[in-house]
Amino acid sequence: MANINLLLFVIEAISYFTLMVMLLHFRHRIGLGMFLTALGVMHFMETYLAAVFYVEVPFGIVSPGSSVFFTGKLMMILMLYLQEDAAVVRQPIYGLFLGNLLTVGIAWLLQWHVPVELSPSRAPSDEFLQEMGWLMIWGTAILYLDAIGIILLYERLGRYLKHKIVLRFMICGFVLLTFDQIAFFGALHYVVGVPLAAFWGGWKAKMFAVCIYTALFAIYELWIGRAVVTPNARPISDIFSDLTFRERYNDLLSRTGRDVLTGLYDRTRMELEAPIMIRESLRQGQYATVMIMDADHFKGVNDQFGHLQGDEVLRAIALRLGTILRAADRMYRFGGEEFVAICPATDHGEALRLAERLRWTIETSVMTPDARPVTISIGVATVGEDGDDFTSLLTVADQRLYQAKKNGRNCIVGGPAIDDIAAAH
């Protein structure tokens, strides 16, 4: 029976990770709200299972609520931070905390009602509501500390393990879930009388779950997701405040529009927004990269199939480009079949890897009406190495795009020292 429980444990972890990562990966299409709602709706079940539902596995007595689902939630929060920023991470944490406070408040008010007993076996329990409410509040308070801690630890480890993203992911899980086990188990023992014997089994189960989630994270990074950009070290005071500068431009964004054909930001917005983004990156001591992309031989598509079919190809290109870039990146339609991307917190090497993913994605997923692959050429320029303002970066990127066209198209040019390598497609 213990081995069967362990098998179910693994199946639950894989199922949870698969569903949540799908919601996170496709957030640009379906909205981030679906991921955040799924993350939050599990909180009551996690707490309830941690309080009353335990099974035996080969290494002890464990609760799937704590070992599988809460562990998965914390690792998902770290993945959300890697894909977005801490300003997004704080939303589900604060939402859960306030929701649980409301639960306790409502449970207190319900005590003043005189309920009608419809069935002796279904009598309402105010004590149960209050007990679970306080456990959820305590669990959310710990989750708040866990989320801050796992972000800080991940960034500090970047000083020593900059390019070992998967290892950092695993170490953060081990450390913060050990802290979580100590903090939350104390409440379980005090409030609902969970025996101390379940502590070590629960801790081992969490460490085992971290290993499963790390393996799945490695598979995701290798085969599905783009390489995660390693953020620069930030002070503690910056966590859950404004780690990104996007929120500072809400007024600007409300006054500028989008390209009607592709749905991307338009050139007017680029000319207003991009210089500010570059200056902000410099102020924060971060890299930022400008890419300019051009669809190869696009005039032939319009000439052969007409402008309506050409418009459909442009929409397909814009859609595919948008699914690869992070939410912090900005993609604009520069004009005709040209697109410009601004990528904050992205150094030159990371930008070249991203550019190659963009080039490969378009070549393998966008077709002309007669099923021929569409290709793009890309010029890349980075703050510091190629210029210190948007105009100079765009000029360099445009020159490199021209060089990519001369090199035969369907390639990337990122600098004189690497043109031959980048153009060898």
Image (tube, grey):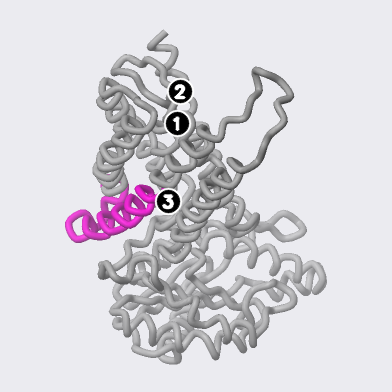
Do callouts 2 and 1 mark residues in contact (Cβ within 8 Å)? Answer: yes
* 309 vs 177: above or below: below
- Amino acid type at circle 3 is Ile
Question: Residue, x 42% and y 64% (percent of image)?
Answer: 85
Do callouts 1 and 3 mark residues in contact (Cβ within 8 Å)? Answer: no
Visible residue check, residue 204: yes
Numbered disc 3: secondary structure: helix
- Amino acid type at circle 1 is Gly
| Of the two numbered discs 2 and 1 in the rendering, the one whose residue sits closer to the viewer | 2
Q: Which residue is the site of mark 3? A: 77
Range drawn in magenta: 140-167
Question: Residue, x 59% and y 52% (percent of image)?
Answer: 26
Number of callouts: 3
Instruction: Tell me how far mark 3 sits from mark 2, CA to CA.
Output: 24 Å
Determine crowd level at label 3: few under 14, some 14-19, many 20+ residues with C-alpha closer than 10 A. Answer: many
Task: Tell me the tag on residue 174.
Answer: none
Determine crowd level at label 1: few under 14, some 14-19, many 20+ residues with C-alpha closer than 10 A. Answer: many
Task: Tell me the tag on residue 53.
Answer: 2
Q: In x, y percent, where is residue 383?
A: 34, 81
Please state which of residues 274 and 399 is positioned toward the viewer in this rendering: 274
Numbered disc 2: secondary structure: loop
Instruction: Tell me how far mark 1 sits from mark 3, CA to CA.
Output: 17 Å
Question: Residue, x 32% and y 65% (percent of image)?
Answer: 231
Q: Is residue 13 left or right of residue 212?
A: right
Q: Which residue is the site of mark 1? A: 65
Provide the major secondary structure of the magenta segment: helix
